């Protein structure tokens, strides 16, 4: 993706507060203005195993606020804030991320920067007036770069081994506008490393070292009363950190590892950058699908409605892994649903295509002798319709009431996803769904599989199944499905 931008920002004026010798040391400075120009490219390559970003920028400053000096009769020179009428900064920045193997990530970043002060007359560190035209910004090295190698891999069902090594380098820089060695920060590089274990229960332990090779360097210089002081950074430090995440349940969904591939197709919700999803961000689906209560309860309701149809019930129960792996099965279904709503359209279509090819092999016969196939458009219409209706009504009843117009827009917009799965006649309104259910109701029947499914949910075997949902959504959903009254005499309840 190629991009270009022009933006303008402001930094408000201020009055500094110093332990001043003279009142003008705390004189106010004016508002700073920045006009920023940037062009760049972002590229995802090698089946998303490599991400490369490159940008060039130009910053035009007006009245930039800087730290400088003013002459003092007692201390020679004291620091103060001042405005530089005109100054600029420009440079090139690049980022490269490579994932050569599962759990292994290599990330590199580099920045080349050029800064310049224009037509500024000020005071130097010796308290003498000086023209600083052409001087560089303080604390602005021409080059900065970093390299990080990170590894995260499971060593058991609940424990992951984590490790990282990172190196950082920056070239020399000045802490004043003059080119005086005493005030310079020499170029330096540091290396940090860590190795640890983390458990999904919330415990973690990490052995770490900072400034691993004990490099001596300073990161700041100041002068006052004819004394120049360099502030050295820490020498090599190392330690052991033991932690526990007390908010693990609240943040559990965010910590669940997201699959990086599905049926051989790489998944990245952020790439290609800028590509639209199947549904627009202002759609009702974007609002509903991000709510765990709506997805937890709505998902259970959708399955109950699907299972009322004997052919769908037999197809799911006889050909999927739901009975033996309800968590994994639900998480995979949830991943596809999230990708279909929020992911780039090309990624969503690729994964849905894989699902359809897999479903193309599913066919059989119900215990009553009715033949079925998973790609039967009539069955796909009902599956798509029940999913939309379940999520929609769960959100409306348990999260936030929706208007009739929003409900119908939700049903209509869902057709874009339903058609990708092979559905052809999904209901475009809630009323159309009720009519569809009335038409299919003669074929509905109770069955022990439905109660086995409810028992799996209520017992907790599938409570952590990531639609995603909070740890209590499954029980709430079962209670809701058993207690809510039927809709319009159809005999179906959410």
Image (cartoon, grey):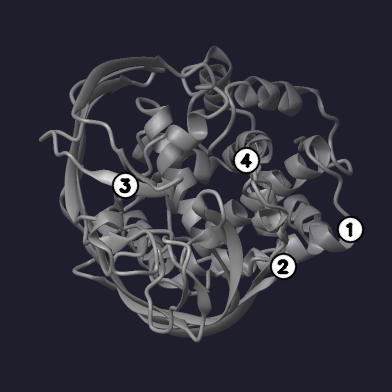
Q: Residues within 10 Å of mark 2 (few under 14, many from 20)?
A: some
Mark 4 in CB contact with mark 1 (< 8 angstroms): no
Location of mark 3 (residue): 219
Disc 1 target residue: 404
Mark before the other along the chain sequence, 3 or 4: 3
Residues at marks 2 and 3, CA–CA distance in whole angstroms: 60 Å
The reply to whether discs 4 and 2 touch (Cβ–Cβ < 8 Å) is no
* Residue 226: percent from left, percent from top: 40, 48
Residue pictured at 50% horizontal, 86% vertical:
119
Q: First in sequence: mark 2 or mark 1?
A: 1
Image-based side of 221 in relation to 494, left or right: left
- Identify the image quadrant of the C terminus: top right
Mark 3 to mark 4: distance in Å? 51 Å
Most extreme residue toward the front is 73
Q: Which residue is mark 2?
A: 412
In the visual, does 181 lie left or right of 460? left
Depth check: give the residue in front, 423 or 414: 414
Element at badge 3?
Answer: strand
Please identify the quarter of the rendering in which residue 94 is found: bottom left
Can the viewer see residue 159?
Answer: no
Indicate which label's residue lies in the foreground, 4 or 2: 4
Give x and y (percent) for residue 368.
49, 37
- Mark 2 touching mark 3, by CB under 8 A? no
Label 4's element?
helix
């Amino acid at each position: 993706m190629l991009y270009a931008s022009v933006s303008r920002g402001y930094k408000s004026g201020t009055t500094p507060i110093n332990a001043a010798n003279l009142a003008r040391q705390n004189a106010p400075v004016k508002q700073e203005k920045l006009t920023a120009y940037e062009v760049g490219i972002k590229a995802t390559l090698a089946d998303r195993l490599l991400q490369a970003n490159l940008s060039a920028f130009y910053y035009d400053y007006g009245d930039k606020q800087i730290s400088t000096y003013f002459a003092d009769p007692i201390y020679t020179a004291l620091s103060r804030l001042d405005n530089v009428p005109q100054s600029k900064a420009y440079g090139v920045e690049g980022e490269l991320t490579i994932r050569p193997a599962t759990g292994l990530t290599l990330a590199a970043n580099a920045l080349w920067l050029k800064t310049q002060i224009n037509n500024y007359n000020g005071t130097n560190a010796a308290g003498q007036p000086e023209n600083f035209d052409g001087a560089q910004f303080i604390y602005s090295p021409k080059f900065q770069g970093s390299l990080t190698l990170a590894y995260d891999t499971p060593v058991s069902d609940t424990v992951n081994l984590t490790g990282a090594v990172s190196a950082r380098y920056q070239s020399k820089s000045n802490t004043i506008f003059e080119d005086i060695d005493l005030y310079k920060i020499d170029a330096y590089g540091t290396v940090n490393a860590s190795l640890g274990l983390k458990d999904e229960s919330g415990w973690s332990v990490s052995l770490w070292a900072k400034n691993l090779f004990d490099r001596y360097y300073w990161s700041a210089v100041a002068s006052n009363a004819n004394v120049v002081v360099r502030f050295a950074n820490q020498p090599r430090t190392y330690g052991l950190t033991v932690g526990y995440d007390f908010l693990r349940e609240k943040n559990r969904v965010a910590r669940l590892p997201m699959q990086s591939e599905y049926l051989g197709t790489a998944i990245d919700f952020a790439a290609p950058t800028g590509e639209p999803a199947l549904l627009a961000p202002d759609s009702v689906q974007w609002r509903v699908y991000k709510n765990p209560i709506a997805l937890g309860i709505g998902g259970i309701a959708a399955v109950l409605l699907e299972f009322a149809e004997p052919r769908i019930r037999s197809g799911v129960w006889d050909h999927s892994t739901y009975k033996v792996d309800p968590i994994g099965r639900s998480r995979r279904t949830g991943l596809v649903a999230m990708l279909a709503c929020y992911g780039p359209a090309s990624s969503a279509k690729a994964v849905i295509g894989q699902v359809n090819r897999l479903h193309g092999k599913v066919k059989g016969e119900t215990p009553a002798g009715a033949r079925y196939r998973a790609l039967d458009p009539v069955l796909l219409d009902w599956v798509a319709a029940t999913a939309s209706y379940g999520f929609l009504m769960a959100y409306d009843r348990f999260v936030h009431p929706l208007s009739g117009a929003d409900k119908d827009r939700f049903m209509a917009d869902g057709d874009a996803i339903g058609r990708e799965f092979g559905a052809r006649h999904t209901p475009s309104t809630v009323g159309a769904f009720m009519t569809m259910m009335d038409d299919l109701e003669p074929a509905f029947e109770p069955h022990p599989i439905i109660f086995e499914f409810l028992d799996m949910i209520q017992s907790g075997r599938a409570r952590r199944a990531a639609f995603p949902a909070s740890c209590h959504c499954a029980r709430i959903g079962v209670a809701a499905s058993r207690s809510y009254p039927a809709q319009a005499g159809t005999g179906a309840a959410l």
